[in-house]
Image (tube, coloured by chain):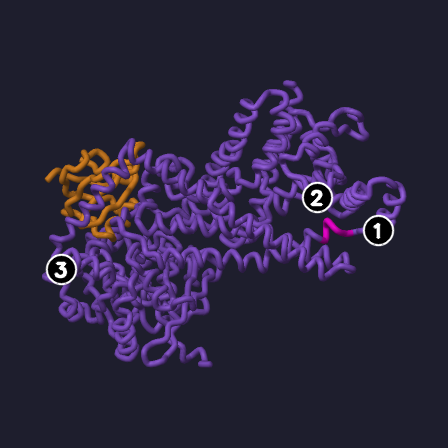
Chain colours: A purple, B orange
């Protein structure tokens, strides 16, 4: 075991689509840790990498970014980590900049910005194979001489060049090579000196040169948020220096790009032959002539999304059935061992195994969805999909990248919410996460089928029933649109990121990366099951189980002489009515009375908050039909259709009529009755958002259900 | 002429950029600077956004942001 001082720290930075993540995976293998940076929702990925001389390094995968200018939190995190200002993370010993050979100039811009933060550097020239194949030639030795840092050709996806990279890094840790920095014109040097004087000398801030540049060049720089100086104090200083720059003839927002490229261009003279580039580009471009075509492009897009959606829906089916069977089998086996201890047996079998099992059932859907997401991203099609759909989403602060996560949410909100990680814009991602639970997921289907089968089909025929089922799938989306717009207005513009998106050249996906992506998403999901869902399952179980006075059972058994099975069902129903959840349902019934619900429906609704599909079996228990009912069950449909009010003003009338059935369906269509979704929102955003969205959507569902019922009974 | 007005596949050159637009500032840090040649490669089916090619890379941007780039035909 080495002490933490001996562990070297190496950061990995690069533009998106450069193969940075492939390189990270190649170097660290499965020794990865994923979390968030303290206080922000930026994914922090670190891994262990053993160098050739046996030294351990902690490799930090920084977010992919084109520039360090503060366009979003990602850039700020990159600046903070490199300068050693991320809480608990000292400045790294070295940074590896992953550079795509085909976009050398643009990629070196980022390297040049990073070098101003004073971290030794090694450059990995990635996608060397593609460049070679296309006859693109780069003089590495000359480049190395001009830049002043080691330049190592790599092919990350095949693991080529990693040994050379390892050697270069091992040497560079000792020699600490620095990339050449531009010599800034006098007015800029002066402005930087002034900032240094004001912040570092006068106010004791620790800011490196590169950070002072970020303060000077970036409008509303994210580095400001980290200053100890109050905004009222630093804003005039920044404004003043930027004005000076302007007077000296340098537009502050443009100065860095112009001057840095002016510095980089001569360094790249004679370094690369670029005729070959045009050939490859035009290949991608001609594919795009078809895939971005006004008619064919859209048709292909719809077709592809159909395949994705169908696969999540149906490929995952058998595996989900398998997990269900397995969970049941494990439950039975363990239940068998615990006979004689009914409470422990119920806790373990119904509470823990049942609760965690019901969550794990979604694992196949997550794996299938991430298989497709990975393929879409690796090939480069994901950016095209976003390009095609962007216009539809602009008005509510979203962009085209929200489409795939929202579509996936129609199968299940959990993989859908996890898929929002493909949205770089934090605000758009947040809104997408918050409206995803409104998309009608597959678990709502049994509720629709049961109620439509019981109340719509017998009266209006199968055609109307089919139309009703179809319409139910849009209720959530219709509610989501204004909600997205409101969130867009409420969240303001501060978190938004400019929507410029690269359409990267088409590439053949790497099997290894795809597997990795699936493994990663699956692992996180299982960890969630083992922690949050485990705890939630126990709580919910207890609410449904306690209190359990034996007198109830005895009284019923004494009364019911005949059918023993009917007696057991009656006991279950009585216990449910007695339980805290049952009592709570009866207590809450007045709240749901405006929607037309009796206490049994209310208990069913409340008991379904952990997982909406529970409604079917809960109704089965409350109507004493035994646990094994499903949406096609004639008994349950009949029981619902014939239930009458037991007391109150409507005593003797039917509980369920068409308005009540519609009201229940609308409630289920909107309500966030899914503990797993709440837990995933908490994981992706935080608990405040998870709880806030839970209450907001529940209220929305209640209002809609009441409206449907009230309008319904007046029309009927 | 502005970037949101140009025809597909014609060759143009950047004359001026409004760097106060954040999208444009971002494109500038990718090398879209005055004198850079530029070409409109695709329009989305609903007319917005557009895809442009410069310096070997293809970027998409929205029409509202494209307004901030002044170009001239080559």
In the rendered image, residue A236, in percent from the top left (x then y), is placed at 36, 55
Q: Nearer the viewer, residue A176 or A376?
A: A376
Q: In the displayed structure, would residue A323 be above or below residue B50?
A: below
Mark 1 is surrounded, within 10 Å at the Cα level, by few (under 14), some (14 to 19) or many (20 or more) other residues, namely few
- Comparing marks 3 and 1, which lies closer to the viewer? 1
Tag of residue A627: 2
User: Do marks 3 and 1 both belong to one polypeptide chain?
Assistant: yes
Q: Is residue A489 visible?
A: yes
Decide which of tag 2 and tag 1 comes sooner along the chain.
1
Q: Which residues are magenta?
A: A542-546
Cα separation, mark 3 vs mark 2, equals: 72 Å
Q: Which chain's residue wears label 3? A: A
Q: Residue at x 36, y 80 (%)?
A: A54
Tag of residue A272: 3
Q: Is residue A540 left or right of residue A313?
A: right
Q: Which chain's residue wears label 2? A: A
Q: In the displayed structure, would residue A70 be above or below residue A292?
A: below
Q: Give the residue number, with chain letter if any, for mark 1.
A: A549
């Amino acid at each position: 075991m080495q002490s933490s001082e001996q562990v070297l720290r190496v950061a990995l930075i690069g533009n998106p689509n450069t193969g940075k993540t492939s390189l990270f995976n190649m170097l660290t293998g499965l020794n990865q840790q994923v979390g968030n940076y303290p206080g922000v929702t930026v994914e922090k990925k670190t891994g262990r990498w053993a160098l050739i001389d046996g030294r351990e390094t902690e490799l930090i995968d920084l977010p992919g970014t084109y520039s360090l200018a503060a366009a979003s939190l990602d850039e700020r995190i990159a600046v903070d980590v490199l300068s050693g200002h991320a809480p608990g993370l000292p400045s790294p010993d070295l940074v590896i900049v992953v550079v795509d050979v085909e976009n050398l100039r643009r990629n070196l811009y980022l390297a040049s910005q990073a070098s101003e933060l004073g971290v030794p550097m090694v450059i990995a020239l990635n996608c060397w194979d593609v460049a070679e194949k296309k006859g693109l030639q780069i003089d590495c030795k000359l480049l190395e001489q001009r830049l002043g840092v080691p330049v190592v050709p790599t092919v990350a996806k095949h693991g080529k060049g990693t040994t050379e990279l390892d050697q270069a890094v091992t040497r560079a840790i000792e020699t600490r090579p620095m990339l050449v920095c531009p010599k800034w014109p006098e007015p800029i040097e002066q402005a930087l000196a002034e900032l240094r004087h004001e912040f570092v000398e006068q106010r004791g801030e620790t800011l490196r040169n590169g950070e002072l540049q970020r303060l000077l060049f970036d409008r509303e720089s994210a580095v400001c948020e980290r200053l100890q100086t109050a905004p009222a104090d630093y804003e005039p200083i920044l404004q003043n220096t930027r004005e000076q720059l302007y007077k000296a003839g340098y537009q502050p927002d443009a100065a860095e790009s112009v001057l840095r490229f002016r510095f980089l261009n001569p360094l790249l003279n004679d370094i690369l032959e670029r005729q070959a580039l045009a050939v490859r580009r035009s290949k991608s471009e001609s594919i795009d002539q078809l895939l971005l075509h006004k008619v064919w492009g859209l048709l292909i897009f719809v077709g592809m999304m159909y395949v994705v959606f169908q696969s999540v829906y149906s490929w995952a089916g058998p595996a989900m059935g398998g997990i269900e069977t397995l969970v049941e089998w494990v439950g039975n086996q363990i239940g068998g061992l615990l006979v004689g201890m009914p409470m422990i047996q119920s806790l373990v079998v119904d509470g823990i195994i049942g609760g965690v099992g019901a969550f794990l059932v979604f694992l196949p859907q997550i794996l299938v969805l991430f298989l497709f997401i990975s393929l879409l991203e690796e090939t480069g099609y994901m950016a095209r999909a976003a390009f095609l759909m962007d216009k539809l989403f602009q008005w509510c602060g979203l962009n085209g990248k929200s489409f795939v996560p929202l579509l996936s949410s129609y199968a299940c909100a959990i993989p859908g919410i996890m898929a929002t990680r493909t949205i770089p814009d934090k605000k758009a991602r947040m809104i997408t996460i918050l409206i995803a639970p409104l998309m009608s997921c597959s678990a709502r289907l049994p509720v629709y089928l049961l109620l439509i089968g019981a109340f719509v089909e017998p009266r209006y025929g199968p055609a109307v029933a089919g139309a009703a089922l179809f319409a139910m799938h849009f209720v959530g989306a219709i509610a989501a649109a204004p909600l997205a717009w409101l969130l867009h207005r409420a969240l303001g513009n501060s978190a938004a990121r400019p929507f410029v998106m690269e359409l990267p050249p088409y590439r053949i996906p790497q099997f290894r990366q795809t597997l990795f992506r699936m493994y990663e998403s699956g692992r996180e999901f299982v960890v969630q099951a083992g922690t949050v869902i485990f705890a939630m399952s126990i709580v919910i179980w207890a609410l449904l189980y306690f209190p359990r006075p034996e007198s109830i059972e005895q009284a019923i058994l004494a009364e019911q002489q005949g059918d023993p099975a009917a007696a057991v069902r009656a006991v279950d129903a009585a216990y449910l009515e007695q339980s805290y959840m049952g009592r709570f349902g009866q207590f809450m019934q007045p709240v749901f009375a405006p929607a037309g619900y009796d206490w049994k429906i209310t208990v069913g609704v409340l008991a379904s908050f952990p997982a909406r599909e529970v409604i079917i079996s809960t109704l089965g228990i409350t109507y004493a039909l035994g646990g094994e009912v499903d949406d096609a069950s004639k008994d349950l449909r009949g029981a619902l259709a014939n239930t009458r009010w037991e007391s109150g003003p409507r005593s003797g009338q039917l509980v369920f009529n068409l308005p009540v059935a519609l009201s229940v369906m609308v409630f289920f269509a909107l309500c966030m009755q899914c503990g797993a979704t709440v837990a995933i929102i908490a994981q992706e955003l935080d608990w405040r958002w998870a709880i806030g969205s839970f209450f907001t959507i529940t209220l929305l569902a209640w209002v809609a259900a009441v409206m449907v019922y009230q309008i319904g009974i007046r029309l009927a | 002429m502005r970037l949101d007005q140009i025809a597909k596949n014609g060759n143009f050159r950047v004359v001026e950029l409004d760097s106060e637009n954040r999208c444009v500032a971002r494109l500038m840090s990718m090398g879209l600077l005055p004198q850079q040649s530029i070409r409109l490669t695709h329009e989305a089916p609903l007319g917005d956004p557009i895809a442009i090619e410069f310096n070997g890379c293809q970027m998409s941007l929205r029409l509202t942001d494209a307004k901030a780039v002044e170009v001239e035909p080559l």
